[in-house]
Image: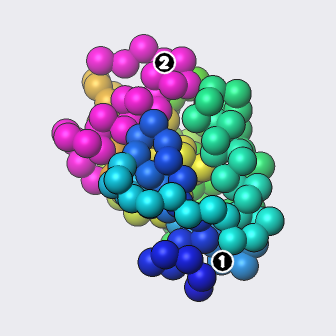
Amino acid sequence: MSGSAGYQAIIATPLGCIGIRMSDKAVSALDYLPADTAEQPPVDAATEAVVAQLITYFHGALASFNVPLAPAGTAFQQRVWEGLKAIPAGSVLSYGELARQLGTGPRAIGGACRSNPIPVLIPCHRVVGRQGLGGYAGEVAGDSLAIKRWLLRHEGLAVE
């Protein structure tokens, strides 16, 4: 892998910096990094396309992404992540609603969301609790939940 710590790009966003990892020409991971992390330009055209779409999203002019994704996960996790990608921007489903759609349980949905290696592009932030936001990245408070709130507000949803 090329780039700092294996990243093919590091970009500044309203949420801090995001490190982009690619597997061939597909995104394999997005990592939230500290805001003071040095930016790194894309190393190739495929990564440049991902960066362009993320920047457009964070500027409020993109509702869905069209970049190849290659998240590593179990067959079940892949199925849940496909379900997440089907939730349109500006919409949410509860863990229970998505679980019913996929024929599983809400806790299993939460586990797959927690394991999502490509947040934002695979929008696990669009899954909420029956009463409240639920968690984000395995946390129910703090910085991770602040990120979920920001993303939902950015997509036009009123959140607590």
User: Quick one: label 1, few (<14), some, or many (20+) residues within 10 Å?
Assistant: some
The quadrant where residue 141 appears: top left
Q: Nearer the viewer, residue 44 or 100?
A: 44
Question: Magenta segment range?
Answer: 138-160
Q: Is residue 100 left or right of residue 150?
A: right
In the rendered image, the quadrant that contains the N terminus is bottom right
For residue 156, the mark is: none
Q: Earlier in the sequence, mark 1 or mark 2?
A: 1
Measured as percent of width and height from the top left, residue 38 is found at 44, 60
Front residue of 103/125: it is: 125
Residue 37 occupies quadrant:
bottom left
Residue 115: x %, y % from top left: 40, 63
Residue highlighted by disc 2: 157
At 49% from the left and 42% from the top, the residue drawn is 13
Tell me the SS state at disc 2: loop
Callout 2 crowding tier (Cα within 10 Å): few <14, some 14–19, many ≥20: some
In the picture, measured across the screen, residue 64 lies left or right of residue 31, that is right
- Does residue 146 appear to the left or right of 105 in the view shown? left
Which residue is disc 1 drawn over?
A: 23
Which percent across, then down, holds residue 61? 70, 27
Outermost residue toward the left?
141
Residue kind at label 1, given as amino acid type: Ser
Q: CA distance from mark 1 to mark 2?
A: 33 Å
Residue 73 seen: yes
Q: Residue at x 38, y 36 (%)?
A: 148
Q: Give the residue displayed 60% in from the left and 71% down from the top.
A: 8
Q: Secondary structure at mark 1?
A: strand
Q: Residue furthest top?
A: 158
Q: Nearer the viewer, residue 84 or 69?
A: 69
